[in-house]
Image: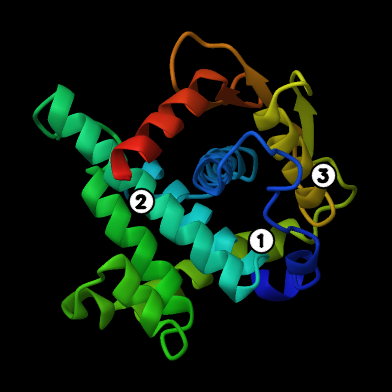
Amino acid sequence: MLKTLLCATALLLPITSALAKDMSAFVEANVLGIVYHELGHAIIHTEEVPIFGQEEDAADVFSIFLVDALFEDAAARSLALDMAAGFEGEAMIRDAEAGEILWWDTHGPDEQRFYNMACILYGADPENRESFAEDVGLPQERAESCAGEYDQAAASWGAVMDTMSEIAGRPALTFAGDMALPVSEIIAAEVRSLNRELRLSRPVTVAVEECDDPNAYYDPEAFRIVFCTEFVAHLERIEALLK
């Protein structure tokens, strides 16, 4: 399973605050969560992973599953709290600007994404993460199902990662971006760490570039994950709203 495949990586992937002194822990955590989400899309594409349901939901599950697999407990909790809070902030912005939930969107409502993320991290170790469930406000009615939800995620994504470990050669991720930007430092360091363990059927580029939009996406035609530089200011805005 993924825990075995990446057992050494937890020691190799500290939160990168020392690298990006101009960024808060909240922004860094959400940058990582966004990159993991888009990496989920990339793996679904390159490894031809069958998805039953919305692909966006599957990528969300992958992102928090990876956090639990890659980081030691305290760091995983901290990251998950900030990532979940990012969805809370997105909901606040939506309510202030759009005033309604876009039910037609491929992404689920931010509130639901918040609880899905919290549930899977809690479900990975419910005996030792009761305080995390309390901190994030996970209702008992949902908490009761979280261990099963994590097991389901482990059975699906863990199997995918096990299969990837058998791929011959090691084409994985390459980074492209302006290293003068703190966000590039974070993402480039993460690419280096992921490349110690990750194998893909096709190499994928992780790029940091201007997009005129606070966005991130996976381009399947170019095999590229793009993190837009404008997203950093958007995350800083969310952080200010949450204070």
Amino acid type at circle 2 is Ala
- Image coordinates of residue 238 in percent, x first then y, are 36, 35
Which residue is drawn at the image coordinates 37% and 54% (left, top)?
Answer: 84
Q: Is residue 9 visible?
A: yes
Which residue is drawn at the image coordinates 26% and 44% (left, top)?
Answer: 110
Image quarter of the N terminus? bottom right
Residue 237 shown left or right of residue 97 in the figure = right
Which residue is drawn at the image coordinates 25% and 69% (left, top)?
Answer: 137
Amino acid type at circle 1 is Met
Q: Which mark is residue 192?
A: 3
> Quarter-wise, where is residue 55 in the image?
top left
Image quarter of the C terminus? top left
- Image coordinates of residue 59 in percent, x first then y, are 46, 47
C-alpha gap between disc 1 and disc 3:
18 Å
Q: Which residue is mark 1?
A: 161
Residue 192 position (above or below residue 202):
below
Q: Which residue is mark 2?
A: 85
Question: Along the polypeptide, which appears first: circle 1 or circle 2?
Answer: 2
Q: Residue furthest top?
A: 212
Residue 38 position (above or below residue 153):
above
Q: 44 and 178: which one is in front?
A: 178
Q: Residue furthest left?
A: 99
- Graded by Cα atoms within 10 Å as few (under 14), some (14 to 19) or many (20 or more), the crowding at tag 2 reads many
- Graded by Cα atoms within 10 Å as few (under 14), some (14 to 19) or many (20 or more), the crowding at tag 3 reads some
Q: 7 and 204: which one is in front?
A: 7
- Image coordinates of residue 203 in percent, x first then y, are 77, 34
Amino acid type at circle 3 is Arg
